[in-house]
Amino acid sequence: MRMYDLIEKKKRGEALSREEIFEMITLYTKGEIPDYQMSAFLMAVYFRGMTKEETALLTEAMEHSGDTVDLSLFGTRSVDKHSTGGVGDKTTPVVAPIVAAAGGVVAKMSGRGLGHTGGTVDKLESFPGYRTALSPAEFTAQAEQCGLVVIGQSADLAPADKKLYALRDVTATVNSIPLIASSIMSKKLAAGTRSIVLDVKCGNGAFMRTPEEAKTLARAMVEIGTANGRRTAAVITNMNRPLGHAIGNSLEICEAMDVLRGKGPEDLTEVCLTLASLMISLSCNKELAEARRTAEDMLESGKALSKFEEWIAAQGGDARYVRDPSLFGRATHTRDVLAEQDGFILSTNAEALGTAALILGAGRATKEDTIDPRAGIILHKKPGDAIQKGDVIATLYTERESALDTAEKAVTAAVVQTDKAPDPEQLIFDVITEATL
Ligand code: URA
């Protein structure tokens, strides 16, 4: 195989064969295809696309480029959830204990935050002692005992995707549906669960800006999962605004625990219940309406909160913080951002708010940066809320006093006010399952 010929073929819009795709991925993973040729190929895919068959083959080739996790001992009960990335997206710490309390097995790997989006692993590390790296034996043992384990992404899982994603990031080829779908699904398939629920974010804080684009991506991923024998579903959710009010690691953990205590924000609670219902339906073989009742019962009875505490303790975290969230403490410097006029909040720019939180210390501008678990933003007002001049729209938390002015300006610019009450926005745009493909 000559890489030159594959680039030429894709440039003409032709489909690659199974052998060509597998050989290309194997050689690229081994470092035998240079980045400049792979970049040219990715750009050809960006413009020419890939057929469903090619996308499925690319996924399979990347899935098998490294280790795969065997969760077969859990039968049909293992289930994973993946979010395409957002701001204030703290669904995993809520959804995972609801599902585990209902009988599903959530044994998953999660990412760290980069750029304006947060990562579950960084949030969980707000608990002193929480171990994000476990040996394969520890991972399986905890899944067996607790039904719930969440660790950081293993470097040996889908290494081809890791290399390709880094290349796409610097060659303006991230935003391609076959490339995103195969990237996400190769990791989910390698992670071994029988069922997969995808939260496809859509809006100004997400990769997919419109519900139509998000639906196309969601369908592509549900098709790949189904073709690979996994029960797969996707929910398309609004990311024109942060989910809930908190942005920043321990702030988000506290809000997630509020949901588990039955006093969380409505939007976050609803998205979590929707995701949890689908996960319970797929992993515990229940009709969706029954799964929803089960999810609600796990919240209302306190069983999900007990499961959360059990999980954090099992993974080495200090469970006293679950019982007393004030132990997380508060950042040294705070500032209230005030409304400049009477009216309503028209919109919020989720990406800009995520970036403001990063400036305050809640995220990383480069992979090497350390994050401050207490830094971030509480957004008190959201689109549709009435405001009066001088109301507190947001509170900023940081150890970096010098960052406050810049972050305040960014938050003020990110929150757009209006005179008239805006039309309510949809929270959940669609649910895509195997049956609705
Ligand atoms: N997340 C991924 O893992 N891959 C992509 O291509 C985009 C988002």
Image (tube, grey):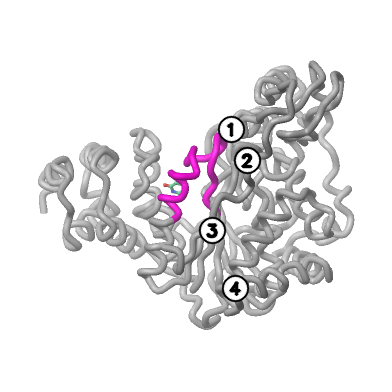
- Residue ID at (61%, 71%): 288
Q: Gap in Å between the C-alphas at discs 2 and 3?
A: 21 Å
| Image x and y of residue 194, in percent | 49, 73
State if disc 3 and disc 1 touch (CB < 8 Å). Answer: no
Instruction: Give the secondary structure at mark 3.
Output: strand
Residue identifier under label 3:
431
Residue identifier under label 2:
87
Q: Mark 3 or mark 4, which has the lower sequence index? A: 4
Q: Nearer the viewer, residue 366 or 200?
A: 200
Q: Residues within 10 Å of mark 4 (few under 14, many from 20)?
A: many
Amino acid residing under circle 2 = Val
User: Taking 130 as reference, is 171 above or below it?
Assistant: above
| Image x and y of residue 361, in percent | 68, 33
- Res 358 → quadrant: top right
Q: Mark 2 or mark 3, which has the lower sequence index? A: 2
Range drawn in magenta: 198-218
Residue 310 in view (yes/no): yes
